Amino acid sequence: MPTPFVQDTKLTAIAVGFKNAEFIADQVAPRIDVMSEDFRWTEYNSHEMLTIPDTLVGRKGVPNEVEFTGEERSGHTKDWGLSDGVPQSDIEKAANHPSFDPLGRATKGVTQLVDLAREMRVANFVRNGDNYNHKQALTSGNKFSDYDADFFEILGLALEQPLMRPNTAILGHTEWFHLSRNKSLLKAMGRNVDTQEGKITRQEFIDLLEIDKLIIGKSRYNTANKGQGANLSRLWGGTAAFHYVNPNLMSLEEDLTFMATASYLGKVAYQKILEPGEMGLRGGKKVTVGDSCNEVQISKEAGYLLTGVL
């Protein structure tokens, strides 16, 4: 049916191209394009790929038959979006100032908030213990801030528990600040912790744990209610997650990974003309940025979660 919103290719390019370097959701839950709003994916039972069947076949026998029962699930992408109104007076002023683009600025601002909301959805998913078959709550004396705790052993043993060994560590910035100063990790790198202080680098941490990537979440959000003073908190905090993130993820139905994002048509930006009375006395334009996607679990056996890390 006709829509008063007209898709704008220039604004869509801004929405798609705008990236906040502190957001990590797309690295943690990679996007996979789906053909329609309704999609299917396979949630794997990883143990079936590790159960050794009888493969002996007699001269006139029939090979044993195996069956993989990864559960096929169906889902529906959800529409996420926000709008911002730009007064006509701002648009007319911009005509004489090429460096000022009020519609582009509004698009970037709205995209930032749409992406921030996705960042929170993914962070909440990652920190939810129900999404893991393997997890551990750290106790007093074994927190990241306890620099004498043996996290070289704790983390090493944790990574061996999932059937699909994690290749990616996901930590909040504060958690990494403390863990990078852990004495057992420094000793494992050959440092003399009795005579010098320091911290391990990200690459050293990757090498020690024999993983591929360390992702640090730095983003913050305002927890205060509208009208109250700002109260900023970190989105990624309180846990340390270790996932197998498939580096060659191509399909939700065939490839194994911890989680992924079904994305339909990607981000889009629209604009609508607002008549006088709809916005002030001179009207204006409303910019809307939308993202149709849904984050899904692929395998609980591809992750490990530490809670209560600080």
Image (tube, rainbow, N blue to C red):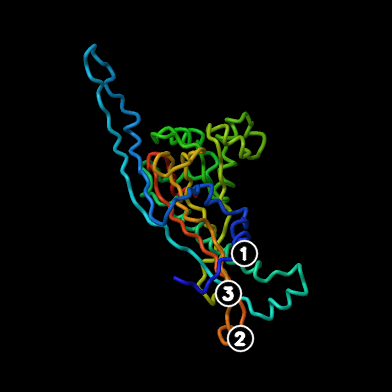
Q: Give the camera-side residue of 32 and 202.
A: 32
Q: Residue at x 56, y 66 (%)?
A: 7
Q: Residue at x 56, y 59 (%)?
A: 220
Q: Real-space Cα distance between discs 1 and 2?
A: 23 Å
In the rendered structure, find residue 11 and report the number of the disc placed on it.
1
Q: N-terminal of the two: label 3 or label 2?
A: 2
Residue 89, image x, y percentages: 69, 81
Quadrant where the N terminus lies? Answer: bottom left
Q: Give the camera-side residue of 205 and 45.
A: 45
Q: N-terminal of the two: label 1 or label 2?
A: 1
Q: Real-space Cα distance between discs 3 and 2?
A: 13 Å
Residue 160, image x, y percentages: 43, 32
Quick one: SS at disc 3? strand
Q: N-terminal of the two: label 3 or label 1?
A: 1
Q: Real-space Cα distance between discs 3 and 1?
A: 12 Å
Quick one: SS at disc 1? helix
Residue type at the position of mark 3: Lys
In the rendered structure, find residue 25 and report the number of the disc placed on it.
none
- Report whether 96 appears left or right of 295: right
Q: Give the camera-side residue of 27 and 221.
A: 27
Q: Quadrant of residue 254?
A: top left
Up-down relation of residue 86 to residue 59 (above or below): below
Within 10 Å of the Cα at label 1, are there few (<14), some (14-19), or many (20+) other Cα atoms?
many
Residue type at the position of mark 2: Gly
Residue 107, image x, y percentages: 61, 66
* Residue lying at the far top of the rendered structure: 59
Give the labeled residue for mark 3.
286
In the rendered structure, find residue 280 and report the number of the disc placed on it.
2
